[in-house]
Image (cartoon, rainbow, N blue to C red):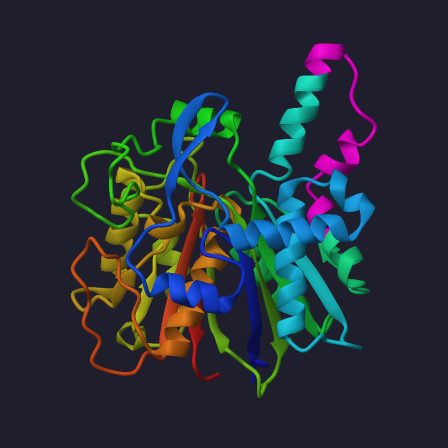
Amino acid sequence: MVTPIAITAVASVSPLGNSFSEVKQAYAQPQTAIQQVTLEGKTHWAAPLALSAREEVERVMQSQSAYRKLDPSVLYALAAARKAVYNAGGLAGVNLGVNFGSSRGATQLFEKYHQEFLATGLAPTLTSPTTTLGNISSWVAHDLQIQGPALSHSITCSTSLHALLNGVAWMRAGMAEAFLVGGSEAPLTAFTMAQMKAMKIPSQLPADSVYPCLSLDLHKTANTMVLGEGAVAVVLEKGIRNNALAYLTGLGYATEILEHNSSISAEADCFQKSMRMALGSLPPEAVDVVVTHTPGTLKGDASEFRAIQKVFGANLPALTTNKWKIGHTFGASGLFSLEMALLVLETQSFIPVPFLPQAQLSKPIQNVLINAVGFGGNAVSVLVSKNP
């Protein structure tokens, strides 16, 4: 018998706030957290941290002098990780591992140091240690005095769900009792925005748009992706737990043959494979809700929807997403979707996309499937359930 894996805590700093109660309150409202921001004189749609989250990150930064030299992506991770471990009861004496990932990494510091190099021909002393990708998990392990394994990785937008896969693998191999997994992203810089613009995927909707990101809207006529920032941390523990928020009951993953650097097939073959793997022997009709990846782009949204149709047939589960609300947080997005799924399971209330027809659920919500995919078709699907 496979040992159950319980989710015993989740915490985040995001455009929705600084606590699970704030997140719950925000999702109960139809307003988006996306707004117009100005970066180096140019205006963009983006979803920056909420004020309470910024204040929490500031407290973390001031807690140790060394933290004042860290990139925001690391500080966001520290803030979320501290709260997640606290929410899980501290985990004293537990063989705890940590795996935090990021798609972009230390974006702001890397750009700052590179500009200094171009101007002076010299690199500041802290350039390398503060911009390496392992920087995030190393500082999280330092901050929480974690003695177990600390690893980082980047698998574009499926990064944080790959962190979850890693945590489960380590625990099932008997190499850790619990794992702190997470994703952190601080991509709201002019250079990152320019990269997205070069791909022609950011939202160009007018400044008075109620919903600048039309994620999951299959009738939109243009790309509407919007970037968001934040970090989310999740605690995984082995076995049946009295404090379990939910259980991981299915894990799936797949990749596609690359046709283009950012391509995904028309029917998202990788998603079809990852969803079927996550379902295992569970009949598709047992899935109540799917939290989609749907970044708000024409091709990305349509291909994932077609994959869902292929897997579930005519009886589709209720579909929802959070990117209309918080934007696309790149590597952190998968676990932000998991946070949303946990909220749905806790409240037994479906969180609709306000500009789409609302699904009607006539039975208790027991099983929620979460999707994430990175550039090049690197998909992960995770099934979370009320019961193991």
The x and y percentages for residue 298 are: 26, 39
The quarter of the picture where the N terminus appears is: bottom right
The x and y percentages for residue 218 are: 20, 46
The x and y percentages for residue 7 are: 55, 74
Q: Nearer the viewer, residue 33 or 217?
A: 33
**Residue 362 lies in what quarter of the image?**
bottom left
Residue at 51% across / 78% down in the picture?
245
Q: Is residue 125 magenta?
A: yes
**Residue 233 lies in what quarter of the image?**
bottom right
Work out whether residue 39 can be spotted.
Answer: yes
Task: Examine the rendered structure and indicate whether residue 172 appears above or below residue 162.
Answer: below
- Tally of marks: 0
The x and y percentages for residue 360 are: 18, 72
Q: Nearer the viewer, residue 297 or 172?
A: 297
Task: Examine the rendered structure and indicate whether residue 171 appears above or below residue 296.
Answer: below
- Position of 284 with respect to 64 (left or right) is left
Q: Is residue 388 magenta?
A: no
Work out whether residue 281 can be spotted.
Answer: no
Give the residues in magenta.
Answer: 117-138
Residue at 63% across / 47% down in the picture?
153
- Position of 231 with respect to 135 (left or right) is left
Q: Nearer the viewer, residue 107 or 292?
A: 107
Task: Examine the rendered structure and indicate whether residue 172 appears above or below residue 56.
Answer: below
- Position of 57 with respect to 340 (left or right) is right
